[in-house]
Amino acid sequence: MTGTVPHEDIRLIATDLDGTFLGAGGRLVPRNVEAVRAAAAQGITIVVATGRPYRWTDVIDPLADIHPLLLSSNGAVIADPATGRVLHHWPIDPADGLAFGAALVRRVPDAGFAVEFASHGWGADARYVAAHPEGEPDLVAPLADLMAFDDVVKLLALSPSTHTEALAAAAVEPAAGRVDPTFSFVRDEGLVECSAPGVSKASALKVVMAERGIDSGQAMAFGDMPNDLPMLRLVGHPYVMANGHRIMLEAGFPIAGYSDDGAVGAVIDRMLHIAGPRRP
């Protein structure tokens, strides 16, 4: 951990959700909640930046009264959770999405695809549904039909036979110039998340910062996975979680601590010069 950052230097705090702001089981950690409330009360802009789609961010509903901004689908959507308004979104070009899918299947034959729509839930092809039966898509159709149905803000590729990191590596060449692939968790059944070229948590955060006249030196951010890497590189005060992916731990960022211990809140507490007993 690093020392205290002067409060007057910080005007924006951005945090990832899973593995960062949230504890085990996707629970809100009281220390983190209290810390961002204290920061918001002092006029600091709070930003939640997540790979989760907008439809799956109700976990932050208890923070609606402090008016955080939400960057969902890895920055492809900027929304105001307090009003439910989508402020900006950046879709994938349908032709690029289809070309990526076709090229990836040539490398990973069992790959299936799902999409997050800007305003109509999500859809998936039959292969994705068979490999990931937990969810019920709003639309089951071939990728061509999914890409044509509505603006697609995130394209997911899943392979039951390919580990996440191997699938991400296989996606690099098919993605070139078409989509930007990343991943937010690691498992044997690989899942890669793709946005439009140039779209990331960092690109969305740049929009937020420009609209509020905030420069990178006035921004603090927390993350744990490779989809957080551009955001942490953007800000002047980046922190990686001790439970983060090795790519993040090797990037040279200060380590905040463990997500289950409320490490985000601990860093913010120090920044605000708040003393008190550690809370669970």
Image (cartoon, grey):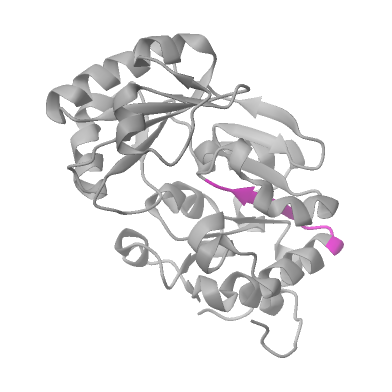
**Residue stretch rendered in magenta on the structure:** 41-50
Does residue 5 appear in this view?
no
Taking depth in this image into account, of 175 and 220 the one nearest to the observer is: 175
Task: Where is residue 206? Give x, y as percent.
Answer: 60, 39
- Residue 144 painted magenta: no
Above or below 273: residue 163: above
Taking depth in this image into account, of 257 and 236 the one nearest to the observer is: 257
Q: Is residue 151 left or right of residue 166?
A: right
Task: Where is residue 69? Give x, y as percent.
Answer: 71, 44
Quadrant where the C terminus sits is bottom right
Tell me which residue sits at (37%, 61%) in the image.
248
Instruction: Name the image quarter holding residue 273.
Output: bottom right
Tell me which residue sits at (40%, 15%) in the image.
141
Does residue 110 appear in this view?
yes
Above or below 164: residue 150: above
Q: Is residue 222 left or right of residue 164?
A: right
Tell me which residue sits at (37%, 67%) in the image.
252
Instruction: Name the image quarter holding residue 269.
Output: bottom right
- Residue 45 painted magenta: yes
Above or below 91: residue 168: below
Q: How many marks?
A: 0
Taking depth in this image into account, of 27 and 253 the one nearest to the observer is: 27
